[in-house]
Image (cartoon, rainbow, N blue to C red):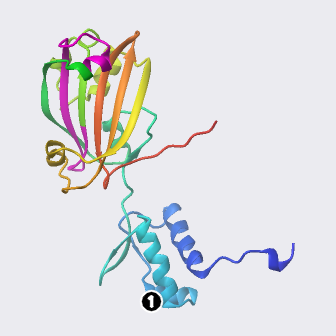
Amino acid sequence: MSRASVAVQPLYLQVKNHILQNIESGRWAASDRVPSENEIVKEFGVSRMTANRALHELQGEGVLVRIAGVGSFVAERQPHTHPLEIHNIADEIRARGHVHRAELVALNSVRAVSGLAADFGVAARSELYYSSIVHFENGVPILLEERHVLPAVAPDYLKVDFARMTPYDYLMNVAPLQEAEHVLRAVLPDERARKLLAMKRHEPCLLMVRRTWTTGLIASVARLHYPGSRYELSGRFRP
């Protein structure tokens, strides 16, 4: 192979990759300060424009947080979950070394309106159980979970202390998962959801509508609201 056929990496990419390698190796952790423009210029022998481009792009990609007059720091990794898998939100948060807290907003019996009745495949005005819970990570709201449940599969649902046990935990015990369906949308939350999640006006959120089955019955329909600026859904698929 000739020298001409070997692609030489642009200098700004060399700087970016150096920073990324230090973060991925664990040498630089979240909130650690990374070299300044001046330090990059001296270490790599590049121009200030090159150093600035590398830092600016890493900031735009969410890797760094830049504070004027202070410096650039490794960003906290954004909480995320796989869009096609079902996990306990409390376990996800604890796995990140953070503190989970749940705040119960509502827990009661409701009547299924036409659309909801169709979701469950039951007659209109059939009884359903309803819960509304805000999940917090280190004191920051990251999920509004609104769930309707078929009483036949979870008769004691309204008696559960959801500040201590998540609906996921309870339902997996009494109505083991057989099948699940996910629909994902980007939406503007209504005023109630926006306030519960402490979101800014006109800030979008990720809405996942999840139906689950057990023993051939639709056990629950959940509407999961994630603030778009604080959460991401990601996954990897291999055919």
Element under disc 1: helix
Q: Amino acid at mark 1?
A: Asn
Q: Nearer the viewer, residue 81 or 71?
A: 81
Whether the magenta-drawn stretch holds residue 123 is answered as: yes
Judge whether residue 160 can be spotted in this image: yes
Which quadrant of the view contains residue 69? bottom left
Q: Could you say where residue 131 lies in the image, as x and y percent from the top left?
A: 19, 27
**Residue 62, relative to residue 176: is it above or below?**
below
Q: Could you say where residue 164 lies in the image, as x and y percent from the top left?
A: 20, 30
* Residue stretch rendered in magenta on the structure: 116-144
- Image position of 137 (left or right of 182): left
Going by the picture, which residue comes out furthest to the front? 114
Which class describes the residues within 10 Å of circle 1: few (<14), some (14-19), or many (20+)? few
- Kindly identify the residue that appears in the image at 31 percent across and 56 percent down: 229
- Kindly identify the residue that appears in the image at 66 percent across and 76 percent down: 9
**Residue 66, relative to residue 185: is it above or below?**
below
* Residue at the spot of label 1: 38
Q: Could you say where residue 213 lies in the image, as x and y percent from the top left?
A: 39, 17
Judge whether residue 162 can be spotted in this image: no
Q: Nearer the viewer, residue 170 or 27?
A: 170
**Residue 146, relative to residue 206: is it above or below?**
above
| Quadrant housing the N terminus | bottom right
Q: Could you say where residue 175 lies in the image, as x and y percent from the top left?
A: 34, 15
Whether the magenta-drawn stretch holds residue 73 is answered as: no
| Quadrant housing the C terminus | top right
**Residue 199, relative to residue 72: is it above or below?**
above
- Kindly identify the residue that appears in the image at 12 percent across and 30 percent down: 106
- Image position of 28 (left or right of 165): right
Q: Nearer the viewer, residue 182 or 151?
A: 182
